[in-house]
């Protein structure tokens, strides 16, 4: 049998993902990493008694009924892990002492925004309608019974057909431009600063939709997730520029999986580079 192998540059979660799926498809793998630990951006460190966490504010696909949940099962992060669903996404306190709370529950968020600024009722309802559009985008899960999976697939298809123009709209409107429509300076500043101002509103709305659906839970400190990776990997570290991580197995990952290199099949070999 042909000896198939893959070299992966970078032991962040994109590199770890590539190693996992490569081995699932019969490849031997070797990951090269310049740091002394795997994990990449998913890292944390301690300073003067405080833990400074650099990643995993929430993990999209944490709900077992989510269509994305099986990916976390495949790479090992979902097993024996409790996800915590937050009641609030963030709080923003203005110069006037008022506080704008972005609740995870969309109904509670709408009520709070209308009470906070009745003059912005029209744009608030447009904002909430955008969040509800994201809530309706619910791909079926492989764990769903056949009938439920079929019905969810049909519903998703109809949503894409009937709401395609709305999806496009939110992809072209930036957070800066949309937040400027609010008359209340507290809400205007909060929405403009909660993410990068030039980001499309689409991503903000979908984040809030995932939170409402309890599908973006907190999975623990980055150190605990990376520690889970260490426990599942046969790691050989060396001092110097290139530290070899050999024999990649199933690992715990994070939301950084969006940078995943490639899921090889048994007939494809590749070199994945993580920058």
Image (spheres, rainbow, N blue to C red):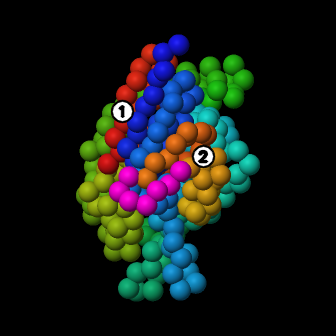
Residue at position x 45%, y 79% in the image: 93
* Residue 221: x %, y % from top left: 59, 64
Q: CA distance from mark 1 to mark 2?
A: 20 Å
Looking at the rendered image, the disc whose residue lies closer to the viewer, 1 or 2, is 2
Q: In this rendering, does residue 126 appear at all?
A: no
Position of residue 59 relative to residue 87, above or below, is above
Position of residue 109 relative to residue 93, above or below, is above
Of residue 196 and residue 39, the one placed in the foreground of this image is 39
* Residue 100: x %, y % from top left: 47, 72
Q: Which mark is residue 234?
A: 2
Pick whichever of labels 1 and 2 is earlier in the sequence.
2
* Residue 27: x %, y % from top left: 51, 27
Q: In this rendering, does residue 234 appear at all?
A: yes
Residue at position x 38%, y 52% in the image: 242
Magenta segment, principal secondary structure?
loop
- Circle 2: element type: loop
Of residue 248 and residue 84, the one placed in the foreground of this image is 248
Position of residue 259 relative to residue 164, above or below, is below
Task: Tell me, yes or no, whether the highlighted magenta stretch contains residue 240.
Answer: yes
* Residue 209: x %, y % from top left: 52, 48
Position of residue 133 relative to residue 152, above or below, is below
Residue corresponding to mark 1: 271
For the record, the magenta segment spans: 236-242
Q: Are marks 1 and 2 in contact (CB under 8 Å)?
A: no
Callout 1: few (<14), some (14-19), or many (20+) C-alpha neighbours within 10 Å? few
């Amino acid at each position: 049998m042909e000896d198939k192998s893959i070299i992966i540059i970078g032991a962040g979660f994109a590199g770890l993902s590539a190693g996992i799926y490569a081995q699932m498809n019969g490849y031997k793998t070797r990951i090269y990493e310049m740091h002394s630990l795997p994990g990449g951006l998913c890292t944390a460190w301690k300073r003067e008694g405080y833990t400074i966490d650099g990643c995993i504010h929430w993990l999209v696909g944490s709900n077992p009924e989510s269509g994305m949940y099986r990916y976390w099962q495949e790479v090992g992060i979902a097993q024996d892990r409790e996800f915590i669903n937050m009641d609030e996404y963030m709080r923003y306190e203005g110069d006037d002492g008022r506080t704008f709370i972005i609740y995870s529950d969309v109904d509670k968020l709408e009520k709070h925004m209308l009470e906070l600024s009745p003059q912005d009722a029209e744009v608030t309802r447009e904002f909430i309608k955008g969040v509800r559009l994201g809530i309706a985008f619910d791909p079926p899960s492989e764990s769903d019974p056949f009938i439920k999976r079929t019905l969810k697939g049909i519903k998703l298809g109809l949503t894409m057909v009937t709401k395609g123009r709305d999806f496009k709209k939110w992809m072209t409107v930036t957070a800066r431009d949309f937040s400027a429509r609010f008359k209340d300076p507290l809400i205007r500043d909060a929405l403009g600063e909660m993410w990068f101002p030039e980001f499309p509103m689409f991503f903000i709305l979908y984040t809030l939709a995932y939170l409402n659906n309890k599908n973006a839970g907190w999975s623990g400190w980055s150190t605990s997730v990376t520690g889970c990776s260490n426990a599942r990997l046969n790691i050989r570290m060396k001092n110097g520029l290139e530290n070899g991580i050999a024999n990649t197995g199933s690992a715990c990952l994070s939301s950084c999986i969006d940078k995943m290199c490639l899921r090889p099949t048994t007939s494809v070999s590749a070199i994945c580079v993580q920058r």
